[in-house]
Image (cartoon, rainbow, N blue to C red):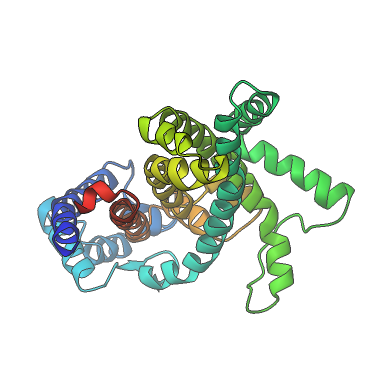
Amino acid sequence: MLTYFLKRVAALVPTVFFVTVIIFGLQQLLPGDAALILAGEDQDPQVIAYLQKKMHLDEPLPVRYAYWIGGVLQGDLGESLRIQQPVLGLIKEKLPVTLQLASMAMLVSLLIGVPAGVISAVAKDSIWDYLANILALWGLSTPNFWLGILMILLFSVSLGWLPASGYVSPFEDLSANLAAMVMPAFVLGGGLAAVLMRHTRSAMLQVLGSDYVRTARAKGLNERTVVLKHALRNALTPIITLGALEFGTLLSGAVLTEQVFSIPGFGKLIVDAVFNRDYSVVQGVVLFTSSVYIVLNLLADMAYFFVNPRLRG
């Protein structure tokens, strides 16, 4: 297992390098001069010169990349020139909010999508299969912002059960926190549940038709054991891949959902940074979320190792 793990880690090193190059390069393609924007309406030449020097905008592109990557390797993602705070501090401030939202949304999607996919595959061409596919199609077709607005109108405005927007830290009031997060978590998790359901159904149908499943049934094992122990376990590989990638997407910031429910997560942070040409924040947040994707893929590979016995052979 250690050899397998080290090989996977070694393969990620060039990936991380190219990610940093792409992040830095694409950032430079944004139109406008960050120094002019940050200088305000007066655009004092001395202020502009100071900002250009501070952000190394007067240096060649390779030199600016070297400054940036050198700071990254030392744990310094730069400083937001707009609000004068370290980027790493902003990430630490927003990460718990987005992490909670992503975790709750992933939990909702797993609780709905995987069981629905298994039932749909086992009861193929039945009323349950058609119903699950209709719900999946609805989940895939419904825009998050539209569903969020409808849920606010129903549960907040009409029924008054949940707050319409805002965020409360769980350390201040756990019940208020859960009440504020349940609707956005369901909005994000509902769409992801539809994707998980379709992938689970497809994988289960393929596995249920395999020889070892027919052999298990021929041995007289009950259907629940065949489905849950033999079929589902071998169908988990594509589900693990999809779950890891989608969780990374959730962590990168569900911009529209966070805007609808006024949740101060990564989505709002990155949108504000792009509009204000706050290069350090954009680069730091995108680098962090890209690193999360890479780590989640590594964890998915490790999960394959335990789920698929053939990798241990």
Residue 171: percent from left, percent from top: 63, 79
Q: Which residue is drawn at 51% across and 68% down?
A: 96
As drawn, the residue found furthest toward the front would be 219
Q: Residue at x 66, y 64 (%)?
A: 167
Relative side of 59 to 116, left or right: left
Asked whether residue 35 is in view, the answer is no
Q: Which residue is drawn at 28% across and 54% down?
A: 305
As drawn, the residue found furthest toward the top would be 125
Between residue 74 and residue 141, name the one nearer to us: 141
Between residue 209 and residue 64, name the one nearer to us: 209
Q: Is residue 272 above or below residue 206?
A: below
Residue 42: percent from left, percent from top: 42, 57
Relative side of 130 to 84, left or right: right
Query: In which quadrant of the rendered view does residue 209 lie?
Result: top left
Q: Residue at x 61, y 38 (%)?
A: 116
Asked whether residue 17 is in view, the answer is yes
